Image (cartoon, grey):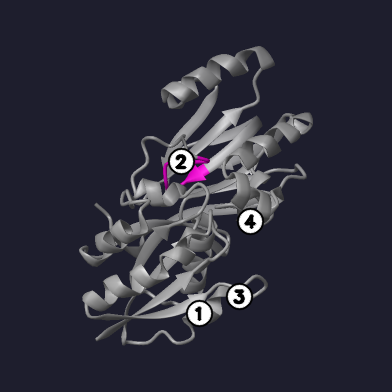
Amino acid sequence: MKNVRFIYNPYSGENNIINELDNVIKLHQEADMTIVPYRIQKGKDLAEALDIIDETYSYILIAGGDGTVDSLVNAMKHRNINIPIGILPVGTANDFGKFINMSSDIQEACRQILDSKPVAVDVGKINDDYFINVASTGLFTDISQKIDANLKNTIGKLAYYLKGIEELPNFRKLKVKLSSKECDYEGEMYLLLVFNGKTAGSLNLAYEAEITDGKLDVIMFKAIQVMELLPLFIKLLKGEHLDSDKVVYFKTDDVYIESPEDIVTDIDGERGPDFPLRIQCIKGGIKLLGIK
């Protein structure tokens, strides 16, 4: 009987995973697998959950949102642990889980994982850290870092929108310089996102992204006149913004980003490193289960 390290975040989303623990164990026992659980605790490093990983473990099952999955990927990469990952998306947005078409039903997601084979997919690297969905900087990118966890769990995505409105007085142009073999840009922007996935806050921004192409999708919204924002937003809702001359868009496996601005970076909802940034795509960097 093979072991499965089951790491779950009881604080994610609406705490649905708590009511499904028995079903997760039952489905794995039926597949002749033993669940070895680890409950994430505030103030504790998730990396300690990996201390017992050895050759008896088939994969790691992670239940949480994008930030939780991101923390696991970082811990695994820094420890050179390369066994597959299965994701139960139980967070608020679950952007990466949606990207790989994981079911939002926990039992169905377990079956999806148990019936699959590992697929090597890309992962992003930003300086010395890793990300699975998106690294971003500019206006509004640190909203998830500022939201009270209890508020986010109580009202979900609405908390992001409310915090965004609160941040409107900080709306300003930001200086930035991008350098890659595909594109060089120096000027002003509002927002910059580097995607391994497709969505941020459930908005399908990087709709041309692929998870096995060895490339990241860089999307930068230029600093434009206020009167030009509404037409651009309409294009965004229609999924036509990547063709706009108000947007810098390109695919790359390596980009260098500089900015003199006092702004933070964000990695899947968590604080990222300071400038300058070197962002790379690690082709086939992690192995995932459950991909349809």
- State the CA–CA distance, disc 4 to disc 2: 18 Å
**Tag 3 residue:** 45
Residue found at the very far top of the displayed protein = 227
Number of callouts: 4
> Which residue type does callout 1 highlight?
Ala
Would you name the residue on which mark 2 appears? 199
Question: In the image, which is nearer the foreground, mark 4 or mark 2?
Answer: 2
Q: Does label 1 or label 4 sit earlier along the sequence? A: 1
Residue flagged by tag 2: what amino acid is it?
Answer: Thr
Q: Magenta region: which residues?
A: 194-201
> What is the distance, in whole Å, between disc 1 and disc 4 at their CAs?
22 Å
What residue is rendered at 47% in x and 32% in y? 249
Crowding at mark 2 (Cα within 10 Å: few <14, some 14-19, many 20+) = many
- In the rendered image, which residue does mark 4 sit on? 272
Determine whether, in the image, residue 279 is placed left or right of residue 281: right
Residue type at numbered disc 4? Gly
1 or 2: tag closer to the N-terminus: 1
Q: Is residue 162 visible?
A: yes
| Residue found at x 58% / y 60% | 127
Provide residue 81's location: percent of width, then percent of height: 41, 77
**SS at badge 3:** loop
What residue would you read off at disc 1? 49
How many C-alpha atoms fall within 10 Å of the one at disc 3: few (<14), some, or many (≥20)? few
User: Percent position (x, y) of residue 122?
Assistant: 37, 56
